[in-house]
Amino acid sequence: MALDDLVTDGVRADSVPNDLEAFWMPFTSNRSFKKRPRLVSRAKDMHYYTPEGRPILDGCAGLWCVNPGHNREPIVEAIRAGAAEMDFGPTFQYGHPSAFRLATKIADLAPGDLDHVFFCNSGSEAVDTALKIALAYQQTIGQGTRTRLIGRERGYHGVGFGGISVGGMVANRRTFGTMLAGVDHLRTTYDRENQAFSKGEPEYGAHFADELERIVGLHDASTIAAVIVEPMGGSTGVLPAPKGYLKRLREICDKYGILLIFDEVITGYGRLGYAFAAERYGVIPDMICFAKGITAGAVPMGGVIARKPIHDAFMKGPEHMVELFHGYTYSAHPLACAAGLATLDLYAKENTFTHALALEPFFADAVMSLKDKPGVLDIRTVGITGAVDLAPRAGSPGLRGYEALEKAFHEEGFMMRIAGDTLVITPPLIISKDQVGELVEKLGRVIEKTA
Ligand SMILES: Cc1ncc(COP(=O)(O)O)c(C=O)c1O
């Protein structure tokens, strides 16, 4: 029977699960969700649709990944054609054309001599890959004592053991044992007292980069391999780098021979109005981690872009030998490459990044207009991303945020992210001014309803 024959009252019978129990949902309050599920079964452009067909305005680009909007025809078609052409192609000792094509395009988009791409399947794998390349690189150039990795408080670098070790979100770390040894953390760049209600990069806080000097003073530079930071802390509630902070970090890394890694899993592919935040800030890191926006979320893909000298340092020894003992079965999966190529073409054709940059002031003003809503403690915006910190309910941190999430979906028909009591909107970059207005109005009502 054709699926469409199963439609009754506009609801496709196969789109409503009859048992929610077996799926242990990631980063989800499973019990609350299963009491009152937030299900979506279809998507197009700026909207999801519930199984009953109710439109849900996408205020979070799926999960910070659907930058060009949902189910865009060129991407759907490329995946369809790719699947028909070749299901899987190994990239250990063999290759397929679209992997090389995509790597070249990514390298062309990246600034400076960031021109070699190592593929994996997620942001978490991208982070672990970059950390491993950093350690192996230091050993390759005769700096084998450099084994220490430096992250930052409130950083999010995915959920692998490398990522949670350098990450700085307490809940993601405290139940998982000792993690990697030899890791230290910079302090967070967030200081509400001096930065509240900043649009874009806060004026205050470049000096937080000097913390790296303190860490070097404690451990000695000869023990430190790399520093990893997000140019804008995303998952912790949108923390843009203070003006000048990343430049200063670069200078200190250069002074001590420490590699600098930007985790651009969120900021890559237009979120801050550029292909990479590195460009926005005029700072070239030694490696960039990417994922999400590379395929618009349509097929999982992640990767690391490395500067030429890092890649080249490995290209020595007998030519028949593997140079880097690392990789994933699905590195550069043909379907992901097809989706990636089509996504990059779409960004170029529609000038998606320029559109985002041009929209940023309007978006920032709109989100900032929520300043006087009840219980708003701070608002931050950068690129097409905004966060509103709400005063928590006494004794129940996160409860107001969760109630806001529920009301947004069930009563206002929109999706957002929450980080505790911080509400985050980060919509697809194709959002129009009218839709920004609609999203912010809905968000305002949710803040009032949960006051
Ligand atoms: C900055 C950053 N790094 C890494 C990750 C992990 O990506 P993934 O969930 O694809 O493993 C994320 C996910 O949100 C992220 O925001």
Image (tube, rainbow, N blue to C red):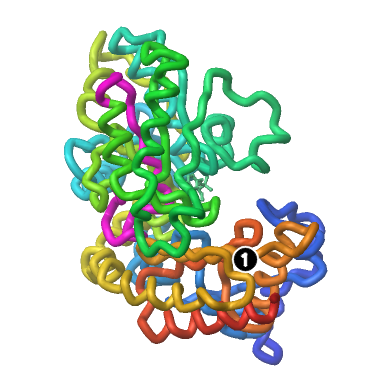
Look at 74% across and 52% down and name the residue there.
24
**Span highlighted in magenta in the image:** 254-277
Q: Position of residue 448 (x, y in %)?
A: 64, 80
Name the quadrant containing residue 261. Answer: top left
Q: Amino acid at mark 1?
A: Leu
Q: Nearer the viewer, residue 61 or 285?
A: 285
Q: Is residue 108 visible?
A: yes
Does 300 sit left or right of 363 as displayed? right
Residue 183 screen position, x and y as percent: 52, 23
Ligand 1 near label 1 (Cβ, under 8 Å)?
Answer: no
**Left of 349 or right of it: where is 440?**
right
Dot 1 lies on which element?
A: strand
Q: What residue did someone put label 1 on?
A: 390
Q: Position of residue 432 (x, y in %)?
A: 36, 81
Name the quadrant containing residue 180.
Answer: top right
Residue under the point 70% across and 76% down: 450
Q: Is residue 213 left or right of residue 276?
A: right
Query: Vertically, is 316 above or below 25?
Result: above
* Number of other residues with Cα within 10 Å of mark 1, as a class: few under 14, some 14 to 19, many 20 or more: many
Q: Residue at x 28, y 14 (%)?
A: 320
Residue occupying the far bottom of the picture: 9
> For residue 256: magenta?
yes
Q: Is residue 1 above or below residue 191?
A: below
- In the image, residue 88 sits, relative to residue 424, either above or below, namely above
State the quadrant of the N terminus: bottom right
Q: Front-most of 299 and 24?
A: 24
Does 79 sit above or below residue 210? below
Q: Is residue 444 magenta?
A: no
Q: Nearer the viewer, residue 179 or 243?
A: 243
Where does the image place residue 159, in percent across and percent down from the top left?
58, 40
User: In screen coordinates, is 45 left or right of 20?
Assistant: left
Asked whether residue 2 is in view, the answer is no
